[in-house]
Amino acid sequence: MISIIPKPTDTPGDNSTAMVLRELQRMGRNYSILDIDSLDPFNCELDGGVIWVCGLKQDQHQFEVINALSVHHRVINTPLSIFTCASKVMTSALLHKHRIPTPKTLFTASRDEAVRFLREQGKVVTKPVYGFDGIDVKLVDSPDMLPPPPFYLQEYVPNNRDYRIFVINGKAVGGIMRVSDTLAHNIHQGGTGIPCEIDPGMQEVAGNAARVVGVDYAGVDLLRTKEGYCVLEVNGTPNWHCMSTPIPKLLAEYFVEQEQLERM
Ligand SMILES: Nc1ncnc2c1ncn2[C@@H]1O[C@H](COP(=O)(O)OP(=O)(O)O)[C@@H](O)[C@H]1O
Ligand SMILES: [Mg+2]
């Protein structure tokens, strides 16, 4: 059985969970929907199969429940990888360790260190450590614009677009470029998504980034540099807005395959 934790931000017009459910129905597969808020991970009647976490609130209770469920079930993505992706600091640490190209980044509680980095760079991008959807991502060029500590600051990479690459099982299966006239090109900040070809550079960088954070599937955000591509972040519960690839079908097939492996 495939059990599903729906995305809390689904709406009738933008429902990631329902898109994959439709594909499972087409394939004639059984599934059940889990109500994570009322579920007791020590007493639930699941058969040890696959649990798909389409989305999760940034909330300690929900994280603890999926973590406990992962003792007896194949949770996709794993709780550890979802947590790693949610933290820009942990993601940066792993990208650095594995030498995956990413903008120069500083994380510190020291305002003096933050100002030193800002002076060295001229201008920096500031981001909330657990941020998403481009919220509070800002370009800062003077110390009085710095947010309150701790400071997660990044070298500004000049660009007029970014790329969101969808990776399943290490393979880049779909991509869009996002364009806007603001700093953060996220769809939620008004960016326009246009399907794009995946070139070998994108495949390599996005596939490696997904691998080192430990996700089964992900949305990897890239910028183009003179040298190739660099990784901004890896999303562990991604949407697939504007993708021309049939992502829901590919995900449904992947969950079915993983569930069969669990039963072997
Ligand atoms: N270092 C950077 N240089 C230039 N633009 C950036 C940089 N970091 C982020 N951005 C822009 O801001 C967007 C949001 O940043 P991201 O790290 O993906 O955080 P979020 O989790 O909020 O999506 C990116 O998709 C990109 O358009
Ligand atoms: Mg992003």
Image (cartoon, grey):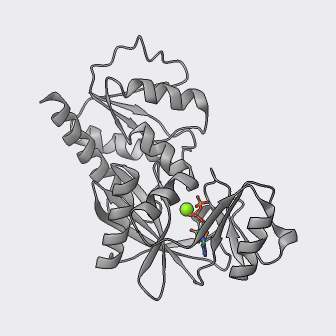
- In the image: residue 245, left or right of residue 94: left
Q: Is residue 8 above or below residue 68?
A: below
Examine the rendering and report whether any part of residue 141 can be seen.
yes
**Which residue is pictured at 84% across the width and 69% down the height?**
145
Pick out the residue farthest to the left: 264
Could you say which quadrant of the image residue 112 lies in? Answer: bottom right
Closer to us: 145 or 6? 145
Ligand number 1: quarter of image: bottom right
* Relative image position of residue 33 (x, y in whole percent): 41, 28
Q: Is residue 150 above or below residue 43?
A: below
Q: Quadrant of the N terminus?
A: top left
Pick out the residue farthest to the bottom: 226
Could you say which quadrant of the image residue 175 lies in? Answer: bottom left
* Relative image position of residue 60 (x, y in whole percent): 60, 31
Q: Is residue 115 above or below residue 64?
A: below
Q: Quadrant of the C terminus?
A: top left
**Which residue is pictured at 58% across the width and 43% down the height?**
9
Examine the rendering and report whether any part of residue 199 can be seen.
no
**Which residue is pictured at 33% across the width and 63% down the height?**
207
- In the image: residue 141, left or right of residue 20: right
Report the number of discs: 0
Q: Is residue 103 above or below residue 87?
A: below
Pick out the residue farthest to the right: 144
Closer to us: 37 or 207? 207
* Relative image position of residue 19 (x, y in whole percent): 39, 47
Could you say which quadrant of the image residue 34 lies in? Answer: top left
* Relative image position of residue 195 (x, y in whole percent): 41, 73
**Which residue is pictured at 45% across the width and 47% down the height?**
16
